[in-house]
Image (cartoon, helix red, strand yellow):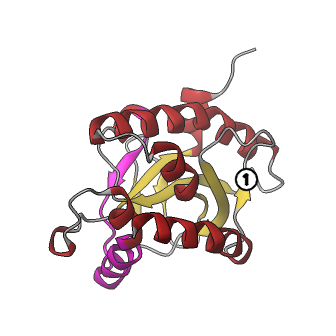
Amino acid sequence: MRNCFLSIWGIIDPIYYFFSRLTVIDKEKQSVFRVRLTRYKGAQIILSDGTKIKKNDVLVKIHLHNIKLMRELRTIESAVRKGMIIYQKVYISMPLLVDYISKHKKRDDIKGIIGITMLHKGVERLGFEVVKPSNHFYRFFKKVTHLPILYLTSKQFNAQSIPNSYYLLISKEKLQQKYQKRG
Protein backbone atom coordinates (compact mmCIF):
# COMPACT_ATOMS: atom_id res chain seq x y z
CA MET A 1 0.00 0.00 0.00
CA ARG A 2 2.78 2.43 0.90
CA ASN A 3 4.61 1.76 -2.37
CA CYS A 4 1.40 2.42 -4.31
CA PHE A 5 0.87 5.68 -2.42
CA LEU A 6 4.51 6.65 -3.04
CA SER A 7 4.06 6.00 -6.78
CA ILE A 8 0.93 8.16 -6.87
CA TRP A 9 2.75 10.91 -4.99
CA GLY A 10 5.57 10.70 -7.53
CA ILE A 11 3.05 11.42 -10.27
CA ILE A 12 1.31 14.24 -8.38
CA ASP A 13 4.54 15.92 -7.16
CA PRO A 14 5.45 17.63 -10.48
CA ILE A 15 1.92 19.06 -10.68
CA TYR A 16 2.18 20.33 -7.09
CA TYR A 17 5.64 21.76 -7.90
CA PHE A 18 4.22 23.69 -10.86
CA PHE A 19 1.18 25.13 -9.09
CA SER A 20 2.96 25.97 -5.84
CA ARG A 21 5.48 28.21 -7.64
CA LEU A 22 8.37 26.33 -6.07
CA THR A 23 11.91 26.74 -7.39
CA VAL A 24 14.85 24.37 -7.22
CA ILE A 25 17.76 26.34 -5.75
CA ASP A 26 20.62 24.68 -7.63
CA LYS A 27 21.04 23.42 -11.17
CA GLU A 28 22.75 20.19 -10.10
CA LYS A 29 19.79 19.39 -7.81
CA GLN A 30 22.07 18.61 -4.87
CA SER A 31 19.79 20.54 -2.52
CA VAL A 32 16.85 18.94 -0.73
CA PHE A 33 15.13 22.35 -0.72
CA ARG A 34 12.56 23.72 -3.07
CA VAL A 35 11.69 27.31 -2.26
CA ARG A 36 9.49 30.27 -2.99
CA LEU A 37 9.16 33.78 -1.68
CA THR A 38 6.29 34.37 0.70
CA ARG A 39 4.94 37.13 2.86
CA TYR A 40 4.77 36.21 6.52
CA LYS A 41 1.21 36.30 7.91
CA GLY A 42 1.66 35.25 11.54
CA ALA A 43 2.24 37.05 14.82
CA GLN A 44 5.48 39.01 15.22
CA ILE A 45 8.51 36.90 16.10
CA ILE A 46 11.80 38.21 17.45
CA LEU A 47 14.70 35.88 16.66
CA SER A 48 17.67 35.42 18.97
CA ASP A 49 19.86 37.72 16.83
CA GLY A 50 17.29 40.53 17.25
CA THR A 51 15.70 40.19 13.80
CA LYS A 52 11.99 41.00 13.95
CA ILE A 53 9.75 39.03 11.62
CA LYS A 54 6.53 40.99 11.20
CA LYS A 55 3.39 40.56 9.15
CA ASN A 56 4.10 40.96 5.39
CA ASP A 57 7.89 40.62 5.72
CA VAL A 58 9.38 38.78 2.75
CA LEU A 59 10.75 35.37 3.63
CA VAL A 60 12.11 32.46 1.65
CA LYS A 61 9.85 29.52 2.40
CA ILE A 62 11.73 26.24 2.26
CA HIS A 63 10.11 22.94 1.42
CA LEU A 64 11.92 19.67 1.80
CA HIS A 65 11.72 17.68 -1.41
CA ASN A 66 9.88 14.91 0.41
CA ILE A 67 9.36 12.49 -2.48
CA LYS A 68 13.07 12.66 -3.33
CA LEU A 69 14.00 12.01 0.31
CA MET A 70 11.50 9.19 0.74
CA ARG A 71 12.80 7.41 -2.34
CA GLU A 72 16.38 7.72 -1.10
CA LEU A 73 15.51 6.58 2.43
CA ARG A 74 12.99 3.82 1.73
CA THR A 75 15.49 0.98 2.25
CA ILE A 76 16.76 2.35 5.56
CA GLU A 77 15.00 0.85 8.58
CA SER A 78 16.46 2.91 11.43
CA ALA A 79 14.61 6.15 12.22
CA VAL A 80 17.80 7.50 13.79
CA ARG A 81 19.80 6.77 10.61
CA LYS A 82 17.08 8.43 8.48
CA GLY A 83 17.21 11.50 10.71
CA MET A 84 21.00 11.69 10.41
CA ILE A 85 20.84 11.47 6.61
CA ILE A 86 18.15 14.18 6.39
CA TYR A 87 20.22 16.37 8.72
CA GLN A 88 23.31 15.92 6.50
CA LYS A 89 21.36 16.68 3.33
CA VAL A 90 19.90 19.85 4.87
CA TYR A 91 23.37 20.90 6.10
CA ILE A 92 24.79 20.47 2.58
CA SER A 93 21.86 22.47 1.17
CA MET A 94 22.33 25.51 3.44
CA PRO A 95 25.24 27.12 1.48
CA LEU A 96 23.22 26.58 -1.71
CA LEU A 97 20.38 28.50 -0.06
CA VAL A 98 22.79 31.37 0.70
CA ASP A 99 23.86 31.43 -2.96
CA TYR A 100 20.24 31.41 -4.12
CA ILE A 101 19.36 34.38 -1.91
CA SER A 102 22.49 36.36 -2.80
CA LYS A 103 21.62 36.07 -6.50
CA HIS A 104 17.89 36.72 -6.11
CA LYS A 105 16.53 39.97 -7.55
CA LYS A 106 14.69 40.63 -4.27
CA ARG A 107 17.66 39.76 -2.02
CA ASP A 108 17.48 43.14 -0.26
CA ASP A 109 13.83 42.58 0.68
CA ILE A 110 14.34 39.07 2.05
CA LYS A 111 14.42 39.08 5.83
CA GLY A 112 14.86 35.41 6.57
CA ILE A 113 13.98 31.82 5.92
CA ILE A 114 10.92 29.95 7.14
CA GLY A 115 9.84 26.35 6.96
CA ILE A 116 7.15 24.36 8.70
CA THR A 117 7.80 20.80 9.71
CA MET A 118 7.30 17.98 12.17
CA LEU A 119 11.07 17.32 11.96
CA HIS A 120 12.46 19.86 14.35
CA LYS A 121 14.79 17.91 16.61
CA GLY A 122 18.38 19.10 16.26
CA VAL A 123 17.62 21.99 13.89
CA GLU A 124 19.14 24.49 16.33
CA ARG A 125 22.58 23.12 15.35
CA LEU A 126 21.76 24.16 11.79
CA GLY A 127 21.01 27.70 13.03
CA PHE A 128 17.23 27.50 12.96
CA GLU A 129 14.95 28.59 15.74
CA VAL A 130 11.82 26.57 16.48
CA VAL A 131 8.58 28.51 16.97
CA LYS A 132 5.07 27.17 17.45
CA PRO A 133 2.60 28.88 15.07
CA SER A 134 0.13 30.98 17.05
CA ASN A 135 -2.91 30.30 14.85
CA HIS A 136 -4.76 27.16 16.05
CA PHE A 137 -6.49 26.61 12.69
CA TYR A 138 -3.17 26.79 10.84
CA ARG A 139 -1.60 24.28 13.25
CA PHE A 140 -4.52 21.89 12.66
CA PHE A 141 -4.32 22.39 8.89
CA LYS A 142 -0.59 21.61 8.88
CA LYS A 143 -1.17 18.47 10.97
CA VAL A 144 -3.65 17.25 8.36
CA THR A 145 -1.39 18.08 5.43
CA HIS A 146 1.54 16.30 7.07
CA LEU A 147 -0.47 13.07 7.46
CA PRO A 148 0.65 11.55 4.12
CA ILE A 149 4.31 12.16 4.94
CA LEU A 150 3.90 10.64 8.38
CA TYR A 151 2.07 7.64 6.95
CA LEU A 152 4.80 6.99 4.37
CA THR A 153 7.72 7.43 6.74
CA SER A 154 6.45 5.74 9.91
CA LYS A 155 6.45 2.01 10.52
CA GLN A 156 3.81 2.37 13.24
CA PHE A 157 1.47 5.06 11.93
CA ASN A 158 -0.99 6.30 14.56
CA ALA A 159 -3.36 9.11 13.59
CA GLN A 160 -3.96 9.94 17.27
CA SER A 161 -0.31 10.73 17.96
CA ILE A 162 0.51 13.10 15.11
CA PRO A 163 3.34 15.39 16.21
CA ASN A 164 2.84 19.13 16.10
CA SER A 165 4.31 21.15 13.28
CA TYR A 166 6.60 24.05 14.06
CA TYR A 167 8.06 26.97 12.17
CA LEU A 168 11.78 26.80 11.56
CA LEU A 169 13.20 30.29 11.21
CA ILE A 170 16.62 31.77 10.58
CA SER A 171 17.43 35.35 9.71
CA LYS A 172 19.15 36.05 6.40
CA GLU A 173 22.12 37.53 8.26
CA LYS A 174 22.56 34.51 10.52
CA LEU A 175 22.26 32.18 7.51
CA GLN A 176 24.96 34.13 5.67
CA GLN A 177 27.28 34.25 8.69
CA LYS A 178 26.98 30.54 9.26
CA TYR A 179 26.99 29.20 5.69
CA GLN A 180 28.41 31.73 3.25
CA LYS A 181 31.40 30.31 1.42
CA ARG A 182 34.54 32.18 2.27
CA GLY A 183 36.71 32.63 -0.75
Q: Residues within 10 Å of mark 1 (few under 14, many from 20)?
A: some
Task: Give the residue furthest to the bottom.
Answer: 137
Is residue 91 shown left or right of residue 98? left
Q: Please tell me whether residue 32 is drawn above or below residue 91 in the rendered image.
A: below
Is residue 169 shown left or right of residue 10? left
Say if the magenta span includes residue 142.
yes
Is residue 22 shown left or right of residue 174? right
In percent of width and height, residue 88 lies at: 48, 31
Q: Secondary structure at mark 1?
A: strand
In percent of width and height, residue 166 lies at: 34, 61
Is residue 55 shown left or right of residue 150? right
Q: Quadrant of the C terminus?
A: top right
Residue 127 visible to the viewer: no
Q: Residue at x 31, y 73 (%)?
A: 134
Q: Magenta segment, which residues? A: 126-147
Q: Quadrant of the N terminus?
A: bottom left
